[in-house]
Image: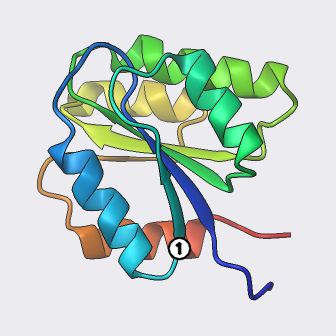
Amino acid sequence: MTDTPLRVLVAKPGLDGHDRGAKVVARALRDSGMEVIYTGLHQTPEQIVEAAIQEDADAVGLSVLSGAHMTLFAKVLELLEQRDASDIVVFGGGIIPDGDIPELERLGVAKVFTPGATTTEIVEWVRSSVARD
C-alpha cells in the first residue's frame, strides 16, 4: 500500500441544484485524510469523467437527487470504459429507490448510499473498498 492519500472526485451530475449532502461527504472524506476534488453543481457525465482522469482519481462519488440516477450513473460508467479508465471506482448516493440499487450495481456502481447513511460509514467503505496499486 502506498503512502499517498486516496483521491476521490465528488460530483453533482445533472440539473439537481442541491449539494449540501455532497459537500458534507466531501468534507468527511477530506477530514479523514483523503484528497477530495469537488466539481460543483450541474456537471455533465463528460465533465465528470474528464475531471476524474485529469485529477488521477481513485474513485468518483456521485450525488444524485434528481431522479435521473439510472441514466447519469450509466453514462459515467460508459464514458470511463471508453476512456480506458474503468479502474476508477464509482459509488454514489442520494434519493435512489431501493429497487434501483441492484440494477445500478449490475451496471458497475460499487456502492450506493441512501439517506441515513453516516459519513463514518461512507469514509470507512471508501477506505476499505477503493484499492490502490
Q: Does residue 8 lie above or below 90 as drawn?
A: below
Location of the N terminus (image quadrant): bottom right
Left or right: 89, with 92 as reference point: right
Q: Does residue 132 lie above or below 80 as drawn?
A: below
Q: Residue at x 18, y 32 (%)?
A: 95
Instruction: Say which of 39 and 90 sits in front.
Output: 39
Q: Residue at x 21, y 18 (%)?
A: 66
Left or right: 29, with 21 as reference point: right
Q: Residue at x 40, y 42 (%)?
A: 92
Q: Position of residue 69 (x, y in %)?
A: 35, 20
Instruction: Say which of 5 and 74 sits in front.
Output: 5
Location of the C terminus (image quadrant): bottom right
**The quadrant where residue 8 appears:** bottom right
Tell me the residue that label 1 is attached to: 34
Q: Position of residue 13 (x, y in %)?
A: 40, 23
Q: Position of residue 71 (x, y in %)?
A: 44, 11
Q: Position of residue 43 (x, y in %)?
A: 44, 22
**The quadrant where residue 77 appears:** top right
Instruction: Say which of 121 and 54 sits in front.
Output: 54
Left or right: 130, with 71 as reference point: right
Left or right: 109, with 77 as reference point: left
Q: Does residue 101 lie above or below 90 as drawn?
A: above
Instruction: Give the amino acid type for the residue marked by disc 1 in the picture.
Output: Met
Q: Secondary structure at mark 1?
A: loop
Instruction: Say which of 108 and 63 sits in front.
Output: 63
